[in-house]
Image: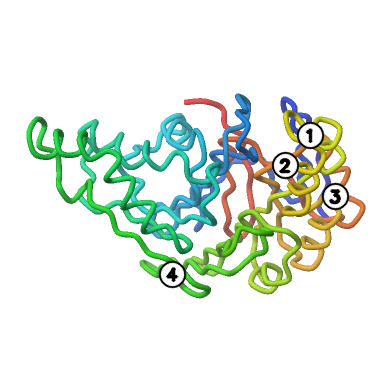
Amino acid sequence: MPVISQRILGAALIAAWLPGAFAQTAKPAPIKVVLLGTAAGPPVNLERYEASTLMQAGGETLLFDAGRGAALRLSQYGIRLGTVSKIFLTHLHSDHIVDIPDLFLTPWASGEARQVPFEVWGPPGTRSMMDKLQKAFAFDIHTRRDIDEKYSKVGISVLSHEVKEGIVFEKNGVKVTTFLVDHGPVKPAFGYRVDYGGHSVTLSGDTRFSENLIKHSQGVDVVIHETVDGDALRTNPGNRTKEQVENIIGHHTTLDQTGVVFSRIKPKLAVYSHILGAPEQLVTGTRKTYSGPLIVGEDLMTIEIGDSVEVRRFQGR
């Protein structure tokens, strides 16, 4: 059995239970995951930005959700914004989509050579949202495309896909599958599974305890799952009423419930992201129902998925 190592890293507890964690590898892993934003919104959090996860595999760069700070975190990590042209949305809450305008406009208006359309997959309503986004910035787009800089017409075009359960993207051996989850009144809401090179990762999106997520996550290497620490949220509700707090808790997965999810999937590594509550308490609360490999994600943390799963904190550039 691999040795458990625990480290206090800033305010977050990381409990790694896998050989070679935080080690260096010479050979690139088939799937690389970067946690860009790990906080639940919409309140502003200066330590953790909102939900956004980058995945790279088979030469494809895929972004899942685009909460506040996604563009800044990509730039901080060293990813050119113009190379990010495929975005997959779990649902249309503002804390998962508010940075789309920045990702859509900024690289194009900065002269980056995006010579492909900006492509977005998401639930019903995605196409209308993207159409209205283009209308909202019509003056800026027209000026830069047709009059002044005359930037690429293709690079400011949009392709929108409204998804159902099933395979929604397949290219260069990379397969993206979407499945329904249960985010209370937000219907539909989706999770995503990415498969490449015999390895796989599941992203829960926002959800209550979901049998469908467990079903679609069988055999994956890594599960990235949201969670809510109900006790912490009740103790520090912010500006929310008691009723609002209970509604929020009821629309997400509690620590003990998430532990059951992890226990039934049995991934090589379970990862918390989209965190509602105090990070240092998450592991303790989950251990009531799950004893396997677990980390609390941090912004800009890298997870490399191959024959082993390796985790690195961001050390700056």
Q: Residue furthest right?
A: 288
Q: Earlier in the sequence, mark 4 or mark 3?
A: 4
Q: Earlier in the sequence, mark 2 or mark 3?
A: 3
C-beta proximity under 8 Å, tags 2 and 3: no
Whole-number angstrom distance, CA of label 4 to CA of label 2: 29 Å
- Is 25 on the left or on the right of 161, as rendered? right
C-beta proximity under 8 Å, tags 4 and 3: no
Q: Provide the residue designation for mark 2.
A: 296
Q: Position of residue 253 (x, y in %)?
A: 76, 54
Comparing marks 1 and 2, which lies closer to the viewer?
Answer: 1
Whole-number angstrom distance, CA of label 1 to CA of label 3: 13 Å
Q: Which of the labelled discs sits on residue 278, or is there none? A: 1
On the question of residue 298 being in view, the answer is yes
C-beta proximity under 8 Å, tags 4 and 2: no
Whole-number angstrom distance, CA of label 1 to CA of label 4: 35 Å
Name the residue type under label 3: Thr
Q: Provide the residue designation for mark 4.
A: 168
Q: Position of residue 35 (x, y in %)?
A: 57, 42
